[in-house]
Image: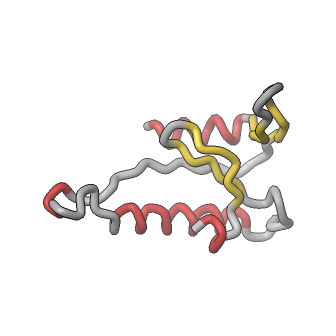
Amino acid sequence: LASKHAVYKIDTIGDCYIGVANLVEEQSTDHVARIAAFSLAVLKAAGETLVDERDPSKGSVCIRLGFDAGPVVGHMVGRRNKKYTIFGNTVNTASRMEST
């Protein structure tokens, strides 16, 4: 789904998937629409994925989402196991939206 919507995966922390638009390629005219469409597609896919295929009465996967638009700072972190990540109030706001 990330590829389909041109959303770049930054990281997975626990059960949190961090994706971003308008970072790797120029998408300044539609980055919010891309993230919104990606989020709706992820919700739909989760809702269609059974928790236990042998027992459909257990229902489908439930997920939480949060997204925001705004400036971020990206940087490499770590000494031995370096990784690229993003920081800023935009990331914090999306995280708070997901957790409430």
Q: Residue furthest top?
A: 79
Snapshot colouring = secondary structure
Give residue 63's position: percent from left, percent from top: 40, 51
Q: Residue at x 48, y 42 (%)?
A: 15
Q: Residue furthest bottom?
A: 4
Quadrant into which the C terminus falls: top left
Q: Is residue 48 left or right of residue 100?
A: left
Quarter of the figure with residue 90: top right
Q: Is residue 78 left or right of residue 56?
A: right
Q: Nearer the viewer, residue 70 or 51?
A: 51
Q: Is residue 44 left or right of residue 27?
A: left
Q: Residue at x 74, y 35 (%)?
A: 88
Q: Nearer the viewer, residue 38 or 2?
A: 2
Q: Residue furthest front?
A: 80
Q: Residue at x 70, y 48 (%)?
A: 10
Give residue 77's position: percent from left, percent from top: 80, 31
Give residue 81's position: percent from left, percent from top: 76, 32
Q: Nearer the viewer, residue 13 or 90?
A: 13
Give residue 98's position: percent from left, percent from top: 49, 42
Quarter of the figure with residue 51: bottom left
- Total marks in image: 0
Quadrant into which the N terminus falls: bottom right
Q: Residue at x 34, y 52 (%)?
A: 62
Relative to 17, residue 77 above or below: above
